[in-house]
Amino acid sequence: MKLVFADARPGRRFERLFLAPSGTSLALLDRLGPKTPTTIILYRKDGEAWVRSEDVSLPERVLSLTFSPEGDRLFASTDDRLLKYSLRTRRIEEFRFPGAAGATELEWIAEDRIAASYPEVWPPVLFLSPFRTASSSSSPARKEIAKHLPRLAASRTRRWLGFCHAFEYVFLIDAESGATSPWGSAQSLTKEPVRTDRSWEGSHFARRIWFSADDAQLAVASQPRDRSEWDEMGICVGARDGSAKRLLRIASHMGTVEVAPDFSVVAAAVSGQPGLIALWDLRSGQRREEIRVGTATRDIRYSKDGRLLAVACEESLSIFER
């Protein structure tokens, strides 16, 4: 991987990184505390070079973002509202939905549909439309069924959604019909054959989900609940129908990990070595390459074509290309 762009921002506190499907726009969430205002720092690709385009300051806490496929618009979820921001006109539009504030994950589905996940809603994923009303596979009802935030991922074609509910179970949603089907539990994922020297025991929780570029496979990152084992993570890969699962164990800390779209490589922050990213072969389990960035790694993202790897540290952004 070759470093093509680096931007150091001393005094910032980056938390999350979002990359447009086009691979030409990128956003960082800068937040100094859990209840403080948020700055969205935007970058774009100008020809062959990356540049910092603008900073968008909001008075409230931003929970999640999602880009349109072209990267010219983004949706932002806050504690109180859902916003749409145009990178061309620099205009902010606000949309309100009954009971739809506070989405912890967003995914762009189609021109007038956004998938949003919630920690205390069943079903935990709603389809929101800026021009219509909120809809889901059944009527949403607030329940104390999940004490942890669900993780949400959309397939490349946007036909399928995967989410981890209550950190325990992995579900698939057909974005066209709204039908939901189970894919597995965090506990069952760790009982599959392991391509390492030993298998895991005890309870685990799911951290993130990825779809392969052809939508045929899923990958789920799971981690032990035992804090003494938080320096290890399992990546379970299987077919979309839940068959042919296999598990790879890697040394990564607290979910700072990203799977390439072709499911060939896993990029993960190395436990106990701040600023070091290791690239693992997902099939053989061998470490391929190491990348050094700034301070502690906060988030990692691959572009949809797998050529670009973006790494957010506490005060800096680094972009690499194959």
Image (cartoon, grey):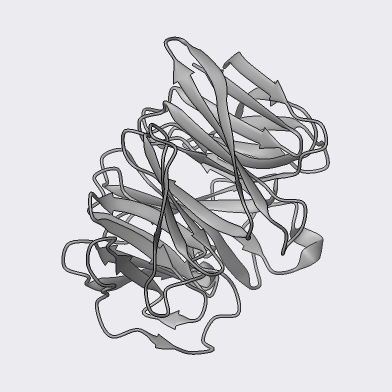
Height in image: 50 above or below 280? above
- Residue 55 seen in render: yes
Residue 271 versus residue 24: which sits nearer the camera? Answer: 24
**Residue 273 placement, left or right of 115:** right
Identity of the residue drawn at 31% across and 38% down: 69
Instruction: Pick the residue in front: 42 or 213.
Output: 42
View extreme (left): residue: 177
Residue drawn at x 42%, y 10% is 47
Residue in the foreground of this view, choosing between 251 and 195: 251
Q: Position of residue 181 (x, y in %)?
A: 28, 72
Residue at 58% over, 53% down: 234
User: Residue 159 location in percent, x, y?
Assistant: 22, 53
As drawn, the residue found furthest toward the top would be 48
Q: Is residue 6 above or below residue 305?
A: above
The image quarter containing residue 291 is: top right
Q: Position of residue 22 (x, y in %)?
A: 35, 30
Q: Residue at x 63, y 60 (%)?
A: 61
Tell me if residue 83 comes above or below residue 248 in the rendering.
Answer: below
The quadrant where residue 198 appears: bottom right
Left or right: 278 in relation to 49: right
The mark total stands at 0
Is residue 265 something one can see in this rendering? no
115 in relation to 273, above or below: below
For the residue pair 182 and 42, the one nearer the viewer reads as 42
Q: Which of the image's four quarters has the N terminus?
A: top right
